Image: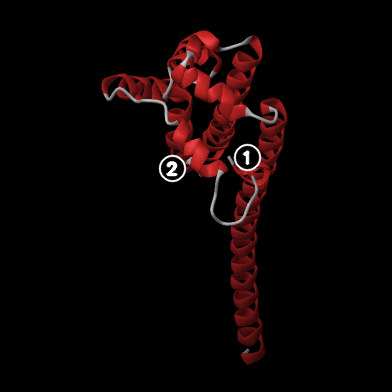
Amino acid sequence: MAQQRFLDWIQIATGIGVSIGLILVIFELQQTQAISLAQLTSDGADQALQRHIADLGETPYVAYEKACSDQSALTGEDFFILDASNRQLLLLVQRAYVINDRTDLYDEVWKAIAGRSFPRVLDNEPGRIWWELFRTDYPHEIRVFGNSMLEEARADNWACRPHQWREKLNKSDGTTDNDARVQI
């Protein structure tokens, strides 16, 4: 009788151990999914950045300065550079948004990325026109976010800030113009 009771307790303990093990496996799978999504986002962002740098050429700030100061001087190449810049900035937003849409893990992340990307797109009139022409290429929630940023840009009369690009290109930390250009 005592032996049977002992075996019953062992069975109960084994069942509890197996249940705890399953719970830990489920928890580990969720962590692995989050890590995989973060890696996917990082890899996608790296690819987008490399394409962005290649599309912009060696002097993207010249096109940006023209968009800010003398729009009549914009060339076809300048429009290509501005288009590539805008698309790549918003591609990062869209990737984070899509991951959030599938997992609900990145809601604040995509909004933070959008909050940094949209001002760069919308602080000049060609960028505002570009957004109005191409906003339908983006999911509804990104369009709503971008449209609210556009209203804010017009209400506050956002002005171009090419001097900030110049400051980034003329860093005092010892990097060259080419090093700084890659970081923009």
Q: Residues within 10 Å of mark 1 (few under 14, many from 20)?
A: many
Residue drawn at x 45%, y 35% is 163
Quadrant of residue 88 within the rendered picture: top right
Query: Is residue 168 toward the left or the right of residue 28 in the image?
Result: left
Quadrant of residue 47 within the rendered picture: top right
Residue drawn at x 41%, y 26% is 160
Quarter of the image with the C terminus is top right
Q: Secondary structure at mark 1?
A: helix
Relative to the observer, which residue lies in front, 79 or 98? 79
Quarter of the image with the N terminus is bottom right
Whether residue 134 is situated above or below residue 174 in the rendered picture: above
* Rendering coords of residue 8 (x, y %): 62, 79
* Rendering coords of residue 57 (x, y %): 70, 28
Q: In the image, what residue type sits under mark 2?
A: Glu
Q: CA distance from mark 1 to mark 2?
A: 28 Å
Whether residue 137 is situated above or below residue 101 in the rendered picture: above
Which residue position holds label 2? 108
Residue drawn at x 47%, y 31% is 162
Which residue position holds label 1? 181
